[in-house]
Amino acid sequence: MSTLSSHEHKIQAMSGDQRADKEPAIHSVPTTDTNIGRVSTHKKPFTVLSALSLGFNITNTGISMVLVISNTVFGAGPLFFYSTLLIAAVTFCVAVTLGELVSAYPHAGGQYFWAAQLSPERYRRFFSYMTAILSWAAVICICASSAQASANITFQMVLLSRPDFGYQRWMGFLAMEGYNILAASLTVYEYVLPKLSKGFLMFVIVVTSALFIALLAPSSPKQSAAVVFGAREYFNLSGWPNGVAFLIGMNGVNWGFSCLDAATHLAEEIQHPRKNIPIALLCVTGMGLLVGIMMSLAIYFAAFDLQGTTDIIALLNAVFNNNPTCAYVLGISMLFCLVNALASAHAWQARITWSLSRDQGTPFHSYMSRLAPDPFLTPLWATLWGVCWVGLCGFLYLGSLTAFNAFVSGGVLLQYITYATPAALLLLHGRKNLIRGPFFWPKFGPVANVIVILWTLLTLIIYSFPYFLPIAADTMNYVSVMVVFAILYAITFWIAYGRKHYRLLDIQLASD
């Protein structure tokens, strides 16, 4: 294992205090090579381009926009356009916050490792473990959502070709499970991942550009700018007042800017992580803003019949006057993008699990802390662990669509909780006490940290509102139940397992 840099020795020197319960402080634990297959023992395959490619392939802003056009009922064009600007600004603050933290503490654990660095000694293990479990749960939600979206696109195309097709939920369940396994299989070769990420980045850009052109190029009727930008009556079928409907509808747009921390978990697989990962985070944010604006305008200039705008396949078919060829071609292309997003998310969750298992924080940690031998060099057991959990989410979809929707919707909220936790701990710890990396914004950084915390609190409230008035059981929003369940699950897992086994042994920072 490579020796600690002088910067890391400086970090260790600041943590000489010992815990009252005789557990060593996190930075004073000697790091030894335990043959668990650390990534630092072989060539680091990721660069800025491949890291931002993996991150953008997961956020996939353009494709996410077209998949949530059912949110049209909360505000149509004005909702998508203005919430894109707002959420992109918040995401920029998230990128700055995560960038400063990963520049100071590059580690595959990401949020949970930063929480450990910044927490008071007495509560270090608890805050770190809670953040780790919630971060992992958020990624499982993202994976399940991507698997379901892949199945939805598939059956939307089937329904277009056969209007009399009788969809049954078990069909979607089988499709979800198939896409789950297929996507995970794309992540098992380490040397393939950067190439796959960069290749699919180009493919996503091409598909997004094609969607933009396909929606606007035909001579079909177009909406006026007054409707798209909200100068006329606000389109709202939710039953809520327009302002509340706008806030609730942001949830769908927010999916296109979620998953930003994915690149931070590549800290041990990328060259110069202290500089390159913050660059990747800012690039993903900027690309998301550009693509989000493009797609929101394209969709709602093309969507002449707002009330009938429920899915992208039907919209493409209508734009081309019931000629389905374009819908099929672009539908298949979007399906490839979604499978790639699911594969990238599996790579993301596997690295969280792998890092946590090195600290004995997961069941079967002796297996999941290993990297598979050549030619794989990936956390294969950790990948399979995630595949199993996403597969269980499929059974939830089979049992109750309402419960499943609440489960996957909680992914955004859980992510924000894991972003706000180290941000709050950083402010309590004192930014002046942070061992600064090369990416540090002394003036805007505190503003970004506060915005991330306030936005998290706002979304926890707003995204939990019922979707429609009057309230009905089948349209009720149960995401608050899911978030509470996830927190209780994490606490229970801490009491039953983590409190005894979680040791924060893996403290080696990624080297440049």
Image (cartoon, grey):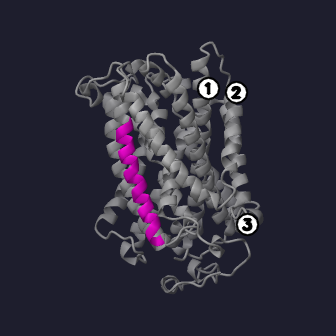
Determine whether label 2 and label 3 are within 8 Å by CB: no
Q: Where does residue 24 sit, x and y in percent of width and height?
A: 62, 81
Say which amino acid is labelled 3: Arg
As rendered, which of 442 and 497 lies closer to the eye? Answer: 442
| Nearest to N terminus: mark 2 or mark 3 | 2
The range drawn in magenta is 274-295
- Residue 365 position (above or below residue 326): below
- Residue 355 position (above or below residue 56): below
Say which amino acid is labelled 1: Phe
Q: In whole angstroms, how far apart are the C-alphas of marks 2 and 1?
A: 9 Å
Residue 289 belongs to magenta span: yes
| Nearest to N terminus: mark 2 or mark 1 | 1
Q: In whole angstroms, how far apart are the C-alphas of marks 2 and 3?
A: 35 Å
Q: Where does residue 141 sit, x and y in percent of width and height?
A: 59, 45
| Nearest to N terminus: mark 1 or mark 3 | 1
As rendered, which of 444 and 383 lies closer to the eye? Answer: 383
Which quadrant of the view contains residue 283?
bottom left
- The total number of labels drawn is 3
Say which amino acid is labelled 2: Met
Binning the other alpha carbons within 10 Å of mark 1 as few (below 14), some (14 to 19) or many (20 upward) gives some
Magenta region, main secondary structure = helix
Return the residue at label 1: 155
Residue appearing at x 70%, y 80% in the figure: 33
Q: Which secondary structure, mark 2?
A: helix
Return the residue at label 2: 171
Marker disc for residue 370: 3
Residue appearing at x 33%, y 50% in the figure: 89
- Residue 100 position (above or below residue 146): below
Q: Quadrant of the N terminus?
A: bottom right
